[in-house]
């Protein structure tokens, strides 16, 4: 097998060709990839069975096994994802804005590919095709490093898509999967300065910390979602109950699920016992006032307030004011998605201005913060950092912009 | 003196107040700062004389002494810079775009402050006020770490501006200068995760390398400008001569000056001897064909093609095609500003699409790539990276965007 830098250079070279490819060519490769994933389903599922057998032997958790598992329905989802991306508008070449200067020079800001997008991800093999599709449509090379648990599935999926690219006339190295899943290879990967133009880690806190510590390439962090719902004193309490239940329970394992409920003291008595009833099956931990009103709730520690449970557990706090609510959210939030339920225009305005997060919501569930729900068509993650891209990462966020300046011989004097 | 993390927390706290401040308050602080810089000129110049005396004693180069030196004119320039920033539109609160989804949720993308902007810079004390002004106007705290050579000047300038902020009702910790100019302090500074929201280094390659290696906070690199002018076979050669002379000679020490000339073989004979005559006083180094046509030119090494001379020196290469010109520029360019002189629409289109740089210019001098010339009013540097901001960094690039989602109780099903 080739070394990581050599693989990287192959993606880099291929990325130049992808950057110049027409939308029609890229879409043909995506649609061809979708067809080929289904045509070669048997091969993919066989590789997946090998991964699953290894995982079960090594005694990993049922959750991990579940994330690893592919079946006909999931393959159809992967193929459908590629078809959907083929149907999205091509971001490459979009003129974002343009103006003329007194000197007569005409300036345009034009969207273009980043180059090579590196993705380090964990156990879900569907990320291989999802990420590859978005990278290709945005004109980038995809340099993927999945987990060892999914290596056989990922290898076959990547090979299938590379075949589809070649059939469409694109270089197959526009998608390269690193087969060396060692820690050392990951370390080398995140230090490929000049090769990887942006690294997007999709994994837990230890991966993120390793990147902050060791990466020399630029990155966008797809981070945790410790999301709050603040129920203001002027909230429609029926609406608040529905939003809290939806944000906590509809899909508790995802990053835009709510993890913490903050309630204004003036409505705590009217709201908390009622919502606790709605949340049957959800473990509640709260402060003293919460426990007075909801005797079944356990005590909440600072750690609880800082934790993304990703489970049927919710921390609760009663606050005396909007100021304290905002302070609590800014202290414990992870910059993902934070919601207020209120009828007060002033409270809504202050909350949306002062809460520091990628998305702030008024009278809507945090579950809406999602690339598809935002209309991006698909997403490669949700950024919790402030630079480059904040919130859902769609095709646009996989591009950069270039200034194009046109003149008739202008010089500066 | 307080430790770096403690200083950082002070800026962080202050930044929350600055983020909420009205344009009027921020502008009053900037205008007050401009007045106070002039009113306290004697104090600033005395501190500067102490820095200069130390620099001269330690035998640093005249260039460094020149960069350190302040005088009445430079102070007026600094004050004028703050006044200019006060006159710019406030980027905070700008609605970038907005749309409604089928679910009825209304989404806006709203510009807001990054939080704390950290700047590590070298000898020019005017950066202290320039950077502080842009950070404040964009609603950010400014956390500055200048060089030891300029420490006395920087300390007084920062104190003056802090006084002006306090008079305008803003927290003085919206501007904090790190007085510890040790290497260790710089190392600690670039690892203040959770405090510094973006780090902008303004310095040479060794500073940039140190940041790539050690920083854990997000950063935007203000990098080198190894800028090229490509004279196409269809170029107006008179125009090309004027652009080359302007881009090389008008101000050779700046990052948007040209460092390399690439000429199509078909016009080399007509162009190179003529432009060499225009460039009297400029040292030319070139390939074999260049030296045949311009006998006074020395031989160019690969290193010469990769070097940002920042001086009256220019590397020259004759290429057989547009393809080779683009390949040369992409190989040796630093992603800053690259120009083509051509009459061919096809050549202009291919060059602007395929050259990978923050700015690509057609029939205009690279010297135009500048925040003021682009109409940004002022700049804090020019980014050569692709993420977040590419090209001149003005007020907009010192902000982030947040999604604000408004509904009437929408939940996901």
Image (cartoon, coloured by chain):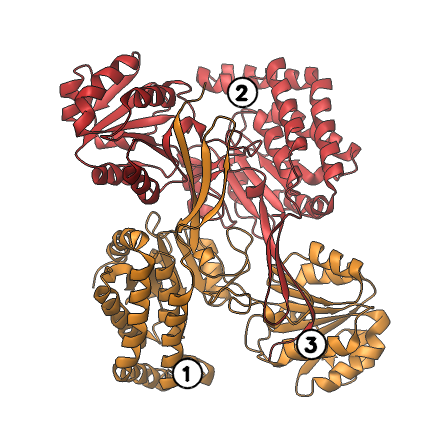
Chain colours: A red, B orange
Q: In the image shown, does B132 or B280 lie closer to the viewer?
A: B132
Question: Whole-Å distance between the Cαs marked 3 and 2?
Answer: 59 Å
Residue at the location (52% across, 25% down)?
Answer: A123
- Tell me the residue at 66%/84% (across/down): B282
Tag 1, which chain? B
* Chain letter behind tag 2: A
Counting other residues with Cα less than 10 Å from the Cα at mark 2, is it few (<14), some (14-19), or many (20 or more)?
Answer: many
| Distance CA(mark 1)–CA(mark 2) | 63 Å
Comparing B59 with A128, the one in front is A128
Q: Is residue B382 above or below residue A372?
A: below
Mark 2, secondary structure of its residue: helix
Marks 3 and 2 belong to one chain: no
Residue underneath mark 3: B244
Q: Is residue A227 visible?
A: yes
Task: Give the number of the disc on residue A68.
Answer: 2
Classify mark 1: helix, strand or loop: helix
């Amino acid at each position: 097998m080739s070394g990581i830098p050599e693989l990287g250079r192959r993606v880099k070279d291929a990325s130049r060709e992808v950057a110049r490819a027409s939308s029609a060519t890229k879409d043909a490769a995506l649609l061809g990839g979708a067809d080929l994933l289904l045509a070669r389903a048997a091969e993919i599922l066989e590789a997946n069975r090998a991964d699953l057998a290894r995982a079960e032997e090594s005694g990993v958790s049922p959750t991990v096994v579940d994330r690893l598992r592919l079946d006909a329905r999931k393959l159809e989802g992967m193929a459908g994802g590629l078809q959907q991306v083929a149907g999205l508008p091509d971001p490459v070449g979009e003129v974002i804005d343009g103006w003329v200067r007194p000197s007569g020079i005409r300036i345009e800001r034009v969207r273009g590919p980043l180059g090579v997008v590196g993705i380090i991800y964990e156990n879900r093999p569907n990320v291989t095709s999802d990420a590859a599709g978005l990278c290709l449509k945005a004109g980038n090379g995809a340099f993927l490093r999945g987990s060892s648990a999914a290596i056989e599935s990922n290898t076959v999926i990547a090979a299938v898509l590379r075949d589809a690219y070649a059939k469409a006339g694109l270089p197959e190295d526009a998608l390269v999967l690193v087969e060396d899943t060692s820690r050392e290879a990951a370390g080398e990967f995140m230090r490929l300065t000049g090769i990887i133009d942006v690294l997007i880690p999709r994994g837990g806190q230890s991966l993120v910390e390793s990147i902050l510590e060791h990466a020399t390439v630029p990155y966008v962090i797809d981070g945790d979602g410790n999301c709050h719902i603040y129920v203001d004193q002027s909230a429609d309490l029926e609406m608040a109950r529905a939003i809290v239940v939806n944000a906590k329970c509809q899909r508790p394992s995802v990053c835009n699920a709510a993890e913490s409920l903050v309630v204004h003291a003036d409505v705590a008595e009217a709201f908390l016992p009622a919502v606790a009833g709605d949340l049957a099956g959800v473990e509640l931990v709260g402060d003293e006032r919460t426990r007075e009103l909801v005797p079944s709730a356990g005590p909440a520690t600072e750690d609880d307030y800082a934790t993304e449970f990703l489970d049927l557990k919710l921390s609760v706090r009663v606050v005396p004011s909007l100021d304290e609510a905002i302070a609590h959210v800014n202290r414990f939030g992870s910059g993902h998605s934070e919601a207020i339920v209120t009828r007060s225009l002033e409270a809504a305005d202050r909350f949306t201005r002062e809460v520091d997060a990628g998305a702030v919501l008024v009278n809507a569930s945090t579950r809406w913060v999602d690339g598809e729900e935002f209309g991006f068509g698909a997403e490669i993650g949700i950024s919790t950092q402030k630079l480059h891209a904040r919130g859902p990462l769609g095709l646009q966020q996989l591009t950069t912009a270039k200034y194009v300046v046109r003149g008739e011989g202008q010089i500066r004097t």
